[in-house]
Amino acid sequence: MTKVPDTPGIPDILSAEFNADPYSAYRIMRSEAPLIWHEPMQSYIVSRYEDVQRAFKDEVFTTANYDWQLEPVHGRTILQLSGREHAVRRALVAPAFRGSELRDKFRPVIERNARELIDEFRGAGSVDLVSQFATHFPINVIVDMLGLDKGDHDRFHKWYTSIIAFLGNLSQDPDIAADGLRTREEFAEYMIPIIRERRDNQGDDLLSVLCRAEIDGTSMSDEDIKAFCSLLLAAGGETTDKAIAAMFANLLAHPDQMEAVREDRSMIPKAFAETLRYTPPVHMIMRQPAEDVVFSGGEVPAGSTVTCLIGAANRDPERYADPDSFNVFRDELDASTAFTAAAGHLAFALGRHFCVGALLAENEVEIAANMLLDAMPDARLADDYVAEDKGVFTRGPARVPVVFTPRTTVSAGA
């Protein structure tokens, strides 16, 4: 079995070299080492599209890895469940993230939060879309949807940053681990009293929806709801944050494509889907096979951890033409299915654990992009901009500095 630290030409996945440019390493992995045993992570690594897709869709692959990867910081979540237990729990939470519930109740929340953030810089003529918009927007939306106090935004941001660091702690840094465990305690101390109070005083917010959700006599306990809110803040915040920033960085780096999207807003979902393929916010998701499985590079024993490299699979030339180019016009991506379990890209995973918040993310990105394009119709990257993405487990632009002609009034479209 290939061992990546000893393989010439492939930087260790934990190295600074890999962090600086994972895509060069992905190319070599796909062609020369499609299955790697990584001793420090105690995990097999797969990088080809066909292998990652199989790990997400084939029933033999479980999410038992989340028992140690997620539960210590979130508590037991829907991601760890299987069979009827998973189906019932997903049915309890899914309605809030699709259809009329999402369209009628939560789209206004998304619009309000986007407008409030844009109002802070629309007259300035410059903005860093990472620090002044993307970092705050999805967290504000989720906090608002849950009916929590937006004055606690900084606390929520600290918690979700700590949780994401824990999930991506591939080198097992003890300080990161301790901070994640401390976050679980702090979040529980904050949320459990609110959940109990909300059960007695329900409203229209998402937290109330979760409190009263019931199927065949099954409802969610206080701990279940707390764990789901923790997962929602982390997964919904980190991924949408990085996706919005990356989409604008990609479009602004390709002015012809930016102009096409600006002129035809129906292309925003295509731009988002291509961003999820080209620069996905989550670069790796783990799975655990219940029995021995054979990948294109060899066999993996039952019970092993398999690290699925989404960032590599989404640029597999066997699946996508000219995969290392950002192209909103590409034929292989169907925007009508890009945010469903039938998606071609793998950014939301696939199968029964396909991301329950995919349509929420699509709505957030579509609304935010429309409002940002209205507020900054002549936006361009600042002259001193140097593209720099950060992260290994999750990855996104460090900054996206933009200059534009200031506008002091809100346009009809915004």
Image (cartoon, grey):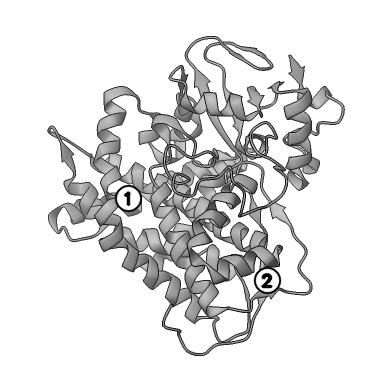
Residue 77 appears in the rendering:
no
Identify the residue at image location x=64%, y=81%.
404
Q: Quadrant of the C terminus?
A: bottom left
Left or right, 206 with reference to 363: left
Q: Earlier in the sequence, mark 1 or mark 2?
A: 1
**Nearest the camera: 28 or 44?**
28
Mark 1, other Cα within 10 Å: few <14 / some 14–19 / many ≥20: some
In the displayed structure, would residue 132 be above or below residue 51? below
In the displayed structure, would residue 155 be above or below residue 311? below
**Nearest the camera: 89 or 253?**
253
Task: Residue 298: give x, y in percent of width and height.
Answer: 67, 12
Q: In terms of image quadrants, where is residue 125?
A: bottom right
Amino acid type, mark 2: Pro
**Nearest the camera: 395 or 266?**
266
User: Separation of disc 1 and disc 2 at Cα?
Assistant: 32 Å
Task: Residue 52: give x, y in percent of width and height.
Answer: 58, 28
Identify the residue at image location x=46%, y=16%.
60
Secondary structure under tag 2 reads strand
Q: Quadrant of the N terminus?
A: top right
Left or right, 375 with reference to 148: right
- For label 1, the residue is 97
Q: Outermost residue toward the right?
A: 8
Left or right, 33 with reference to 80: right
In the displayed structure, would residue 93 be above or below residue 32? below
Task: Residue 59: give x, y in percent of width and height.
Answer: 43, 19
Q: Outermost residue toward the front?
A: 331
> Are dots 1 and 2 in contact, CB under 8 Å?
no
Q: In terms of image quadrants, where is residue 247?
A: bottom right
- For label 2, the residue is 401
Mark 2, other Cα within 10 Å: few <14 / some 14–19 / many ≥20: many
Q: Which mark is residue 333?
A: none
Q: In terms of image quadrants, where is residue 114?
A: bottom left
